[in-house]
Image (spheres, rainbow, N blue to C red):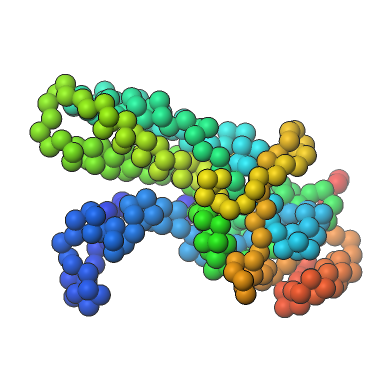
Amino acid sequence: MGRSRKAFRIRPNLPDELAAELGIPTDLSEYESEKYFGSFEDRFFYHHFAYRGRSLYHYTRQEAFVSIISNQTFWVSNVRHFSDYSEIEYAYEILRGLISEISGKAKYGLEPAFLHQVMNDAKPDQRDSYVLCFSTKFDDLNQWRSYAAPGLGYCMGFSTDSLEQLQERYQGRLGQCVYSRKAQREILGEILAYALRDLASYFPHYGKGDINEGLVEARSIVFAAHFATIAPLFKNPAFADESEVRLVFDTPKTPAPIRFRSGSTSIVPFMDVNFQVSDLTAISPESLVVKTCSRPEFVTGSAKKFLAACGYEKVSVTSSKIPFREGL
């Protein structure tokens, strides 16, 4: 993720004086901690996946650019239809491998029963996720080649604040992808350890063979739901150069109907995510970069006229500085 990793704490460490100033007790139960700091899942997501940069960039071809700006709408596609065909399954493979490693070390009947149940419940088809992709990289050759070719292409820059407004409007999650296999295993190790501690708290004196099947099943369902929220952000290391940040939406939460379009290899499910985030507010691109072409001044001039006609007069428009010649 490009930054040093620190273990997640159930409750943020606050100095006693600051906690007192904020009116927050220094000795909180987990229930009270959730009241003050949000749920464990929300805090865990923010700690490991929050993107803290100012801007993000969406690369696309001219036809899609015209559609996005004209309709003030993103097409957000089902994650299983992306170019990385291991999407989602990749995260579950890591989970299964980690469970296989620790299952033999489980001491009590409750623990191996829980891990076995997780293996059964945590399946890639448990939840349908729809993803809008951005990169942290501005005017990047790899992005031009991958997502804005052939022909004319555009890189739209959006502020992180505006994308967080979309996140709230459509109940999504804006998260930075994790590419390091080591980091991925550490993150999964943390939520598994938390789940096992949580399980043990129900039975402080259970014996070696004691199993409560109802409890095991209930806690496994909670774990599987939590894992499903982070699985779309686990990426194969081969794609690390993309430096991707994703706006992830789940069909049960997002108030947008599923539509279908023709893709290069299949029919692709997608949903419309409109720029409008409230009755009076809509997000807007901050910048636009036009891919290298033979007539950059002419193309950027056309783009400025188009943006102005759509109400985006203030967008900064420039041409790429990369001397990339396409089609040789």
Q: Residue at x 28, y 54 (%)?
A: 9
Q: Residue at x 76, y 70 (%)?
A: 318
**Horizontal side, residue 227 vs residue 158: left or right:** left
**Horizontal side, residue 86 vs residue 152: left or right:** left
Residue 50 pos. (x, y %): 45, 58
Within the image, what quadrant is residue 97 found in?
Answer: top left
In the rendered image, the vertical position of residue 188 relative to residue 101, given as above or below: below
Query: Closer to the camera, 30 or 234?
Result: 30
Where, quadrant-wise, is the C terminus in this rendering? top right
Q: Residue at x 68, y 56 (%)?
A: 74
Residue 102 pos. (x, y %): 29, 29
Q: Is residue 89 something that shows in the picture?
A: no
In the rendered image, the vertical position of residue 162 relative to residue 249, given as above or below: below
**Horizontal side, residue 230 vs residue 287: left or right:** left
Query: Closer to the camera, 297 or 167?
Result: 167
Residue 65 pos. (x, y %): 77, 58
Q: Residue at x 56, y 45 (%)?
A: 251
